[in-house]
Image (tube, grey):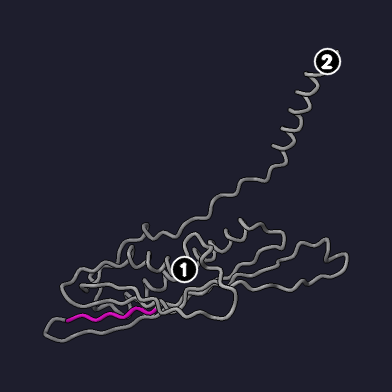
Amino acid sequence: MPSRRSLLLAAAASVTLAACQSAAPVRPAPRAVDFSAFGPIVLNAATIDVVDATRPAAGVHVEPRAVTPPLEAMRQWTAQRLQAAGRAGSVRVTVRDASIVEVPLAKTKSGVTGYFTNEQSHRYDGRVEVEITGEAPVAGGGSFRGTTKAAATYSATVAENATLHDRDATISEVSRRLAEEINARLDAGIRKDLTAMVVR
């Protein structure tokens, strides 16, 4: 007949196994924004500066909860994508919007059905708007001045039972998607509108 000690050990093992089986799956950590996979855009300018011209808008701002907030992503974009290679001239990257706003969503179902339905409870609306102005002397004694602008938006929702980790991961994903879109648009805009300053 099993001893009391054996029964206790068996019970403890069963509890441990059950806890392992019911543990929530480990979610991958949100990815930080990174532009190192893209080659630099070399510009005929001596300086490249970033200007924060964002203004607080209405709503609950949650962008600080992102692994890489949109404004920080634009500073990183400037450092990794733009390279100064001139003796004179300047480039100014003005960030006019870099926000992610939380918007509560109304339930669409009520009563017993609503109680047992896991609906989307919040939406995260992200927006980035950037203006790049370049000035540089050109051959023959003249000068060039050009501007390109780009904006990107992206939204995502979370369910009402989402954990704080899930919500922060969604916010980080919104910021990453914004960075991807604005990167592509600014790259094309620079090569089109500031082509006189592009070395390569």
Q: In this view of the protein, which residue sits in the foreground, 111 or 150?
A: 111
Q: Identity of the amino acid at label 2?
A: Pro
Image quadrant in which you'd find residue 52: bottom left
Q: In this view of the protein, which residue sits in the foreground, 101 or 182?
A: 101
Q: To which residue does mark 2 refer?
A: 2
Q: Position of residue 82 (x, y in %)?
A: 30, 68
Q: Identity of the amino acid at label 1?
A: Pro
**Is residue 28 toward the left or the right of residue 113 in the image?**
left
Magenta residues, start to end: 131-137
Q: CA distance from mark 1 to mark 2?
A: 63 Å
Q: To which residue does mark 1 refer?
A: 70
Secondary structure state at the residue bearing disc 1: helix
Please tell me which residue is depicted at 83% across the width and 63% down the height of the picture. Answer: 115
Q: Which quarter of the figure is the C terminus placed in?
A: bottom left
Q: Position of residue 161 (x, y in %)?
A: 72, 59
Q: Is residue 31 magenta?
A: no
- How crowded pointer 1 is (Cα within 10 Å; few <14, some 14-19, many 20+) is rated as many
**Is residue 37 toward the left or the right of residue 157 in the image?**
left
- Total labels: the figure holds 2
Residue farthest toward the bottom in the current orientation of the protein: 142
| Main secondary structure of the magenta stretch | strand
**Is residue 165 toward the left or the right of residue 191 in the image?**
right
Please tell me which residue is depicted at 70% across the width and 62% down the height of the picture. Answer: 159
Q: Position of residue 117 (x, y in %)?
A: 80, 62
Task: Specify which label sits upstream in the sequence, 1 or 2.
Answer: 2
